[in-house]
Amino acid sequence: MSRGVVLLSPSACGVAGYQACRRTFLGTADQVSEARRFVTDHLAAAPEELLFLAELVASELATNAVTHTRSGEPGGVFQIAVELRPAESICITAYDEGSTSHVIPHSAAEDEESGRGLAIIETLAMQWGVVTTPGRHGVYCELDWQTKR
């Protein structure tokens, strides 16, 4: 995966996009904030409440990529893809370098500091899921433009 912003095609959400792009990040914890900034910059035209949710989703997906996959190993990278369909939805996908385990959403204990990422995604999403292609794994989340949380 190369660094920089590129056009995204096709969308993980399954619809040819209106405005779509992706960017590759180093697989380090400090890049999670860069991923959030990338998403909010790309979605500047979105309503403020939806922008907040998109930033939260991007943070959770990027954190999972760095924490739970080979993307977080030395030299690893992850990619964030964003598709904006004004007045319809936003799709955010995090592509990583895969893992040897399968992560599923679970309920974290009150005193746990982590373990809520996919549960948050599941709560906020119109739909979410996993996209797998040879050598690449992705988790996507589609947010409804009309989301009121």
Image (cartoon, helix red, strand yellow):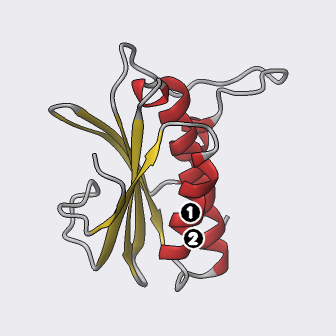
The residue that disc 1 covers is: 54
Residue drawn at (45%, 22%) of the image: 103
User: Where 97 falls versus 121 (above or below)?
Assistant: above
Q: Nearer the viewer, residue 130 or 67?
A: 67
Q: Residue furthest top?
A: 100
Which numbered disc, 1 or 2, marks the residue that appears first in the sequence? 2
Are dots 1 and 2 in contact, CB under 8 Å? yes
Between tags 1 and 2, which lies in front? 2
Where is the C terminus found, in terms of image quarters? bottom right
Q: Residue furthest front?
A: 75
The amino acid sitting under disc 2 is Thr
User: Where 33 falls versus 50 (above or below)?
Assistant: above
The residue that disc 2 covers is: 40
Q: Is residue 110 left or right of residue 79?
A: right
Write down the quadrant of residue 139 in the picture: top left
The amino acid sitting under disc 1 is Ala
Q: Is residue 148 left or right of residue 126?
A: right
**What is the distance, in whole Å, between disc 1 and disc 2 at their CAs?**
7 Å
Q: Can residue 145 be spotted in the picture? A: no
Q: Can residue 73 be spotted in the picture? A: yes
Few, some or many C-alpha atoms within 10 Å of disc 2 (few <14, some 14-19, many ≥20)?
A: some
Q: Nearer the viewer, residue 75 or 43?
A: 75
Residue drawn at (24%, 60%) of the image: 11
Give the x, y percent position of residue 33.
64, 53
